[in-house]
Amino acid sequence: MEFYQYVIAIVGSFFAGAINTLAGNGSVITLSLMTEMIGLPGNVANGTNRIGLFTQSAAGAFGFWQNGRLDFRRSWAFLVFTSIGAIIGAIVAVKVSNEQFLSVFRFLMVFMLFVILFKPERWLRQTDPNLNLSLGLVIPMFLALGFYGGFIQMGMGIFL
């Protein structure tokens, strides 16, 4: 790699982390930098991206737990079914070719742009923390969310 590529990767990662913290979807930046600028295969870039996502998620979960905002008794179904879907999604991400992954990534990048831009006020509403969903809705919804997160993760916070 050339020196300028290191500089762009570091600066881009800083902005991606800030965007991820404030609004989500910073993975668009990091995946784009790794695949298009650095030239990593899509599935390698996707796996590399998970290191930062894991530490960010672990720190966030610990902070929520430490402040009494993470109730495992109430959220066990969300955690179990999201985890099962994520494992399946990660297995699929490893099995697809680089070209297939990049095709899906590019499509989802454009799709997520439209999701964010179309009626952006819907992403600013406060959610109801006391909302009780039936398991018949939770199971397929969180399996699908987990699959998506395990496969590519980009924009996962928006869907959640």
Image: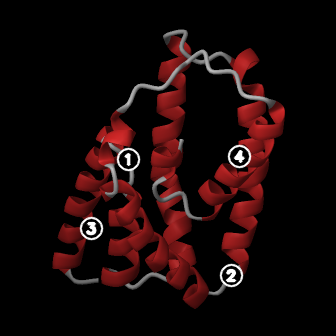
* Residue for badge 3: 9
Which of discs 2 and 3 lies nearer the camera? The answer is: 2
**Considering depth in this image, is 78 or 37 the residue closer to the camera?**
78
Image quadrant for the N terminus? Answer: bottom left
> In which quarter of the view is residue 151 placed?
bottom right
Circles 4 and 3 in contact, beta carbons < 8 Å: no
In this rendering, the count of numbered labels is: 4
The numbered disc on residue 46 is none
Image position of 89 with respect to 62: above or below: below
Secondary element at tag 1: loop
* Residue for badge 4: 141
**Considering depth in this image, is 42 or 149 the residue closer to the camera?**
149
> In which quarter of the view is residue 9 placed?
bottom left
Which of discs 2 and 4 lies nearer the camera? The answer is: 4
Residue in the image at 35% along x and 83% along y: 36
Q: Residues within 10 Å of mark 1 (few under 14, many from 20)?
A: some
Q: Residues within 10 Å of mark 4 (few under 14, many from 20)?
A: some
- Mark 1 or mark 3, earlier in chain: 3
Where residue 14 appears, x then y in whole percent?
A: 25, 53
Q: CA distance from mark 2 to mark 3?
A: 25 Å
Amino acid found under the numbered disc labelled 2? Val
Secondary element at tag 3: helix
Amino acid found under the numbered disc labelled 3? Ala
